[in-house]
Amino acid sequence: MGTIGGEEMARWEKDEGGAKEERIVVSVRMRPLNATEMEKSDPSDWDCINDTTIVFKNSLPDRSVYPTAYTFDRVFACDCNTRRVYDEGAKEVALSVVSGINASIFAYGQTSSGKTYTMAGITEHAMEDIYDYMQKHEERDFVLRFSAMEIYNEAVRDLLSSDGSPPPLRLLDDPERGTVVEKLTEETPRDQWHLRELLSTCAAQRQVEETSLNETSSRSHQILRLTVESTARESKGRDSSSTLLAAVNFVDLAGSERASQASSAGNRLKEGCHINRSLLTLGTVIRKLSKGRTGHIPYRDSKLTRILQPFLGGNARTAIICTMSPARSHIEQSRNTLLFASCAKQVVINAQVNVVMSDKALVKHLQRELARLEHELRYPGSASFAHHSDALRDKDSQIKKMEREIKELMQQRDLAHSRLEDLLHAVADEQSSRRWEDWSRSPASHARGECEDALSISAAYQIPDFYSSRFDLSKESSEQRKRRIELPDEMEPPPRWSISSPPLHESILQPGNKDAEEHCKEVRCVEIHALSTTRSEEFFNLLSNDESESDLLPLTGECGLGDPAPGSEGAAGEQSIGTGTKTTDGVVKPCPGESSPLNSVQKIMSSRELILTRSRSCKASLMNSSILSWLEHVERDSKTPPKIAGEKLPGRPEEDESSRLPVASDYDVESEKLSAEVGGEADDHVIASSSAEDDGRKQLASDQEAQEGVLSEGHGAEKSIKNVGMDANVLCSLESSPSRWPLEFEGKQREIIQLWHACDVPLVHRTCFFLLFDGDPADSFYMEVECRRLSFLRNTFSRGGAGGDLVASSSRCLRREREMLCKQMRKKLSPEERERVYARWGVALSSKQRRLQLARRLWTATDLAHVAESASVVAKLTGFAERGQAMKEMFELSFTPQQIHKRSFSWMHGKSSSLV
Ligand SMILES: Nc1ncnc2c1ncn2[C@@H]1O[C@H](COP(=O)(O)OP(=O)(O)OP(=O)(O)O)[C@@H](O)[C@H]1O
């Protein structure tokens, strides 16, 4: 133990005196059977099986509920000497006193169990060790003070009093020191021998009487207290000197006894009552302390607990040695002792070093503390303040840094997760495609042909339901809201358009159409958000590795479809429109030999031109719920909707011919120029064909190839466009564009439109897709998916066999969808609106079946103006425009091979269903 002062002192103060939580050290010592017990052949029922456990070894049936084994810090068998008991059960605690920590050693047990015998030895050994310690630490100056008292019949007696019969001492409550015994003699032993003498005096003074159990029974509680005060010699007399001050109590309790067993009477009985009462209080205090320091602890119920209050579960280390007799005759008392010991070992104590500063040191310390506090009050930004604020800032920056790291980690995790998902989806889709192809070639697929029709229809008719189920605006996310079609300010829809109608599916969804519901469920929505670009790239990489692509695009150079503008012919039904012919389902098909190269050029022109001309307002107007408003808008401004080359927009005033771009016939000359300039690649794919419908689909592939060929030429294509008279502004825009996405988008869009046409894709699907994907780079993923699916279907159609049946089925499905739209016209459009739409679409007002005529003209051409116009009408009729916008994610790849048996690709098409 070194000097405590200066820095050490400050450190000690910081550590709150080195206080640490520990428990009372509890040991059990069993004495040998005494002569009386042996005479009575009282058997020994207890056995110390190891250093910590004592067991009740009686094999007789025991009716009690007491445990048979008890474990403590240490247990000492009969043959253990007191030295060992002291060394292992009390020494460490007793010697705490020299370190400035209060300590108490208790001996507890029934009468005649050996308390006095044990405690006398322990006190002696402790005194020896303390003196030994003092001798070994000459750097410190020690001062010992010794006092002794006994509590006999609840009276405190001074055992060092020279008076023969001293009066009982009073207990005083000192605010600083707690309970103090007034006028208690305190001796300062000169040396170890002097202390021994004092101990002898105490023993002689103590109340001892003979009882039936113990010839020298102690009838009082004895408390011997040795106070140790130590100061470092080198700091003595200096301002910074400090003193360690602590006391150790050696408490030899009176033995609990049963009056019957002790055969006590008279004074012995009275003594026994006091003893038992005070021991009972001690037991209560210990029990309450063992459950934590909550509630009232009855220290004041006895003089014993009142005097020992500071040492019981307080600022003192404590050791309790419980003594017991092994005799069976004392089984009950022994068990009580063990229960007390069990309770005591639960008590948590909080001993700390007690430092006493010299008056000078104390004054100086207090002055320094006062000055520091005053300084802090006057200058809030002082060093300590600054220190704290700096620490706070550091912590804040640490927190922010950690938050950033967490965010980054979460993003990385999400990214990895979504990539994994994409890869899994891609793999699953590829497997699905292959399985489906295999299956479609199998006889089973033909056998199912009988009910294709109904399935196709139901699947087609469930589309509005599909959309309506996803158009719940109350659940619309902010992203969806952002994507939702916006109405231009100047084009507020007139009130009549806002009349809500029940969802289309309610009127047309056929009962029992469970397959249709399944189709909806199978559509998987994958979040792409900010990762869409990355995911698209990954997806394209996957696609580029997919060799099946080449199979899906048979190069059959045949007649391409013309681009008959709606309204270019007023006839209905089977009448021809333009130079093309109309099939029974109203789909306009071109005549063989119509200029496919011209179509290609037109498509390129349209897509190129759209880069500039398809303004937001234009697109928005197409998407708006108000067709009428849109029509009015078109009539006011001849330059919108898009100035699609070579087409006559429905409703466009005839006198505006001069302002529009060249019509198809204008291209006859220009197309030749283009063909020559693009190296004839487009021409290579265009071969005249005499077939009308199926061949038309094949021609679409040819057109597509031609278009891709032109697009792939890059600047060459632009040059060609320039030659056909494109606005110079368009070219400037193209050349200055930092990204090729707009070009790719337009190309992809046209490709999809043609594939829709070729595959008889349901009009509702076309409409939703067209309106949703408006050129956002993030759309590339969906558009590529759509292309892949449609190419797959087209490839299937072109193979003949089962594909031929599927074509017929899809055509029927499309025809019924047009009938559905026809019915919706009556519900969704007022008579006046219908008239205007008829006029715009070239349906003669005097003709019959006008609604059917209109329905059959929708989506019958592939030029962008026609498509946009058709989409706006279908959107209005199906309520798409009223309900808002669908989630783009539902257009993702969603083939589900596991559910092929349900005849459903989740691709929400009658077509896909009819394929199965
Ligand atoms: N471990 C022991 N080894 C040998 N003898 C012992 C042992 N413990 C106690 N004794 C003897 O047993 C007798 C009773 O011991 P002691 O007086 O210490 O009991 P006690 O618990 O103090 O009783 P009381 O409460 O009545 O004062 C004594 O004669 C003592 O010498």
Image (spheres, grey):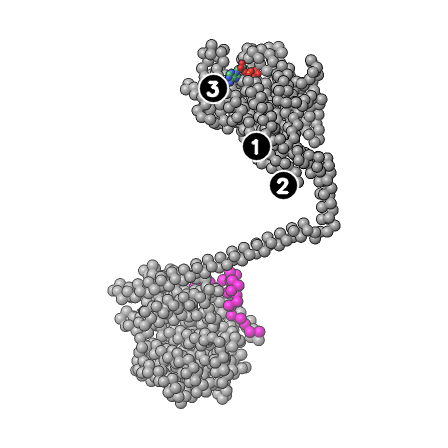
Residue 651 x, y percent position in the rendering: 48, 82
User: To which residue does mark 1 refer?
Assistant: 348
Q: In the rendered structure, find residue 612 and report the number of the disc placed on it.
A: none
Helix, strand or loop at mark 2 = helix
The mark that comes first in sequence, 2 or 3, is 2
**Which quarter of the figure has residue 16?**
top right
User: Magenta stretch?
Assistant: 463-489
Q: Is the distance from the Cβ of mark 2 to the nearest ligand 1 atom less than 8 Å?
A: no
The mark that comes first in sequence, 1 or 3, is 3
In the rendered structure, which amino acid carries the disc numbered 3?
Asp
Separation (CA) of disc 1 from disc 2? 25 Å
What residue is rendered at 71% in x and 29% in y? 174
**Which quarter of the figure has residue 550?**
bottom left
Q: Do labels 1 and 2 touch, CB within 8 Å?
A: no
Q: Quadrant of ligand 1?
A: top right
Q: In the rendered structure, find residue 79 and report the number of the disc placed on it.
A: 3
Q: In the rendered structure, find residue 11 and report the number of the disc placed on it.
A: 2
Separation (CA) of disc 1 from disc 3? 31 Å
Report the magenta stretch's main SS.
helix
Labels 1, 3: front one: 3
- 629 with respect to 504 (left or right): right
Helix, strand or loop at mark 1 = strand
Image height check: is 740 above or below 579?
A: above
In the rendered structure, which amino acid carries the disc numbered 2?
Arg
Separation (CA) of disc 2 from disc 3? 46 Å
Number of marks drawn: 3
- 703 with respect to 235 (left or right): left
What residue is rendered at 31% in x and 78% in y? 556
Helix, strand or loop at mark 3 = loop
